[in-house]
Every structure is written in C-alpha cells, then in structure tokens.
Image (cartoon, helix red, strand yellow):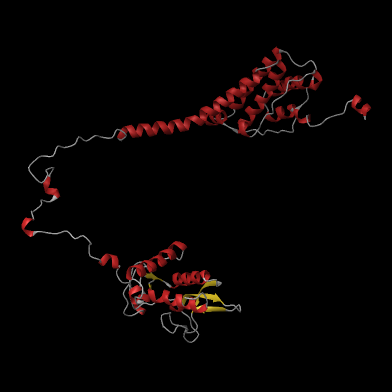
Amino acid sequence: MTRDGAGLATLVDRLRSRGYLSHGLTDEGNPRWLAELGAYTFEPSPAGHSYDRLDRLFAALVEREAQVGPGASDAALVAAAGDDEQFAAAAALLAAELGFPSRVVVGARLLDTDPRGWTPPSCADGVCRGRHMTAWAEVQSASGEWIPVDVTPQHTQPVTPSVASERDPELPTATDPDRAEAIDAVAALKGRSGGDDSVPAEPVVEPWFTGWVRVAVVGIAVLIMTLVPVVAIVIAKAVRRARRRRGTARAAAQGGWDEYVDVGIDAGRAAMPLATRRELAAAYGTRHGRELADIADRATFTTEGVEDGDARRAWELVAADRAEFRGRLTRWRRLGTRLSTRSLLGRATAPRRRPTTPTAHVDERWRAVRVPTSSARGRR
C-alpha cells in the first residue's frame, strides 16, 4: 500500500467496510435512527472520540485480523462499532499518519457523494433536519484544497463473534460415564467433605477495630486535631509575651507597648502603623493607654530611659487594659481574642538590636532615615 492519496483511500475504505454503524449503548425506546436503518442488528457502542476510544476501535480491528488471518473478506473482519464522529476522527488520524493535513467536520449533508450509500441522506428541497446531520473528514491536497472524505461505516454486516470464543479447548477433559459419581451440592455438605469425615471448624477471630473501639479512636483523633491548633496559638502568645518581658528595663517597657498593640489587634482594633503611640492610645480609648505610651516613648527617645519600676508599671498597665479590652466584648468574643491569630500573622514586630550608645534609641519608623553627622559633612 502506498502513502499517497490512493493509499489513504484504500485505508478509509477498509475502515468503513470493517466497521459497523451504531449510535448508542442500548436500543431502548426504539430510537428513530434505528428504525430508519431497516433490517439492522443492533450493536452497542460507547460514546466519545478520545484517543482511548479510538485506540480501542483500532485494537478491535487489528485483533480480528490476527484471529482470522490474511486474505479474509471484509465481512469476516467486521469488528468495531461506532458512529460517524468516531470514524471521522479515526480517518483523520490515518491521514495524519500518512502526512496529510486533516480535520473533522460536523454538519448537514447537502449532496450525495457516497457511492456505497452508507452515509445519511442529504437535505431535500433545501430543508435540513436532524437526520441529515453527520460528520466526515477533510484532507488537504498538495494544491491546498480541502477534499471531503465519507467515513460512515456500513450497517448491513454485523459484528461477528470472536473467533477465540468459538475455539474448542485444546485439552478436553475425558469423561467415563461408568466411573462417574454423583457429587452432593456444596450447600448440602454443611461442613463435611465428600466422605463421612468431619471437617474441623476454624476458630473465628473477631476484629478488634470495630464498634465502640472505632468510634472512640476516631473521636479521640478528631479531638486531637481540633485542640492542636488551639494549644499552638496559646503557647505562641505566651512565648511571645515572656520574650518581651525579658531583657533590660528599656526593652521590657517597649515590649509592653508591643503587647498592648497586639492585644488591641486581637480585640478587633486596627494596627495603625503610621500613628504615634499617643495617637494610637487615643484611638484604642483605654484608661491607661496614654500613660503606657509615655513610658514607651521615654524608653525609646530619651537618654535617661526608664528604670525597672517603670517597666513593671508598663506591664501592669498592659494587664489592666487587656482586661478592659475584653470587658467590652461578649463571652464568645473574649474567647475569640485569646485564640485570634491576627497579631501573629498580620503584624510582624522586627527584633530590636541592643544599642551601643544612649543616643541610638529612635523609633522604628525612622530607622530607614540617616541624618549625616557634622563630622561626615566635614569629610565631604
């Protein structure tokens, strides 16, 4: 067989002759397409024209040819059932394999071009109905013209049974009627073998992972998965609070202010990163916010800083304002503030480096601004 147009025509003709037209898995309800085919033997066919569906179509044809052998007629090689779309896609793949550009077209038939008469009828008097719809393949010639190719398979010769299913067994079992014995039904044996010997019953071991044990294990697993995130949030906040209280009095006072802000954020207040401490304390509206802001400002901006008593006072004010924040909320909202992750995820507090000189304590918002000293100006 050649790889030109004649070779492609031969392959398409074999595909149609060895295929069988079918439009569904069942013939329930006597569909109209089944009645229009006349004396037709129904053959089920799955829908779709994916690569897997077409691979099974070609595999059925190749397997039948291997079973029957070379030289068999097309009637003996009928093995694949499908519709117009599936055979159009199969013909397009054959054309592509031979090097022809190809495509699948779905539409109504306006002219009768099939000499075999297997395709649906063409539109009559310019009126097209559903039975005139079909699919075909188009192949591009060397001149660039797209040539339509009829692909509808035949529907007169049904799919023949598999040869393998009709083959006699190679090693048949010999039967001697004189020596044959009657065998009791399995249900009538009731634990006995063919003779009178009793068959010992095997002990039945009940599985342990059933009933209430399974319910208890699953319940404990669900409880653990529920409590682990809650415990993790509580521990993370406790570790953060302990870390902020450690260190020098200056660091503890600034940590108290950070804790105050995080408590407000967990209670639903905005972070307000551009506001001063006094502005934020006024916005939060707690009784001790202003005093706490003053202590934190002294620790940040003054050379004398704060003492241990001021740091302890700052954390006392934080505890009082925390109680005030939560006192404004309902019981469930108070529980929500304890388990809130807003302060853990939405406001990252950068670690402060321990200053080497008292004048190095500035607000975090101004760390990106560098003011040249007088000695630096002189060197310029």
Is residue 4 visible in the rendered image? The answer is yes
Residue plotted at (58% across, 32% down): 341
Residue plotted at (11% across, 46% down): 189
Which quarter of the image is occupied by the C terminus?
top right
- Reply above or below: 311 against 6: above
Return the residue nearer the eye: 211 or 325. Answer: 211
What percent of the width, then of the height, locates residue 290? 72, 23
Residue plotted at (64% across, 28% down): 262
- Reply above or below: 300 against 162: above
- Reply above or below: 215 against 179: above
What percent of the width, then of the height, locates residue 69? 34, 71
- Reply above or below: 368 against 185: above
What percent of the width, then of the height, locates residue 28? 32, 69
What percent of the width, then of the height, locates residue 252? 68, 18
Q: Quadrant of residue 281?
A: top right
Left or right of 234? Residue 294 is: right
Is residue 288 visible in the rendered image? The answer is no
Residue plotted at (61% across, 31% down): 344
> How many numbered dots are placed on residues in this image?
0
Left or right of 272? Residue 103 is: left
Return the residue nearer the eye: 8 or 48. Answer: 8
Return the residue nearer the eye: 173 or 54. Answer: 173
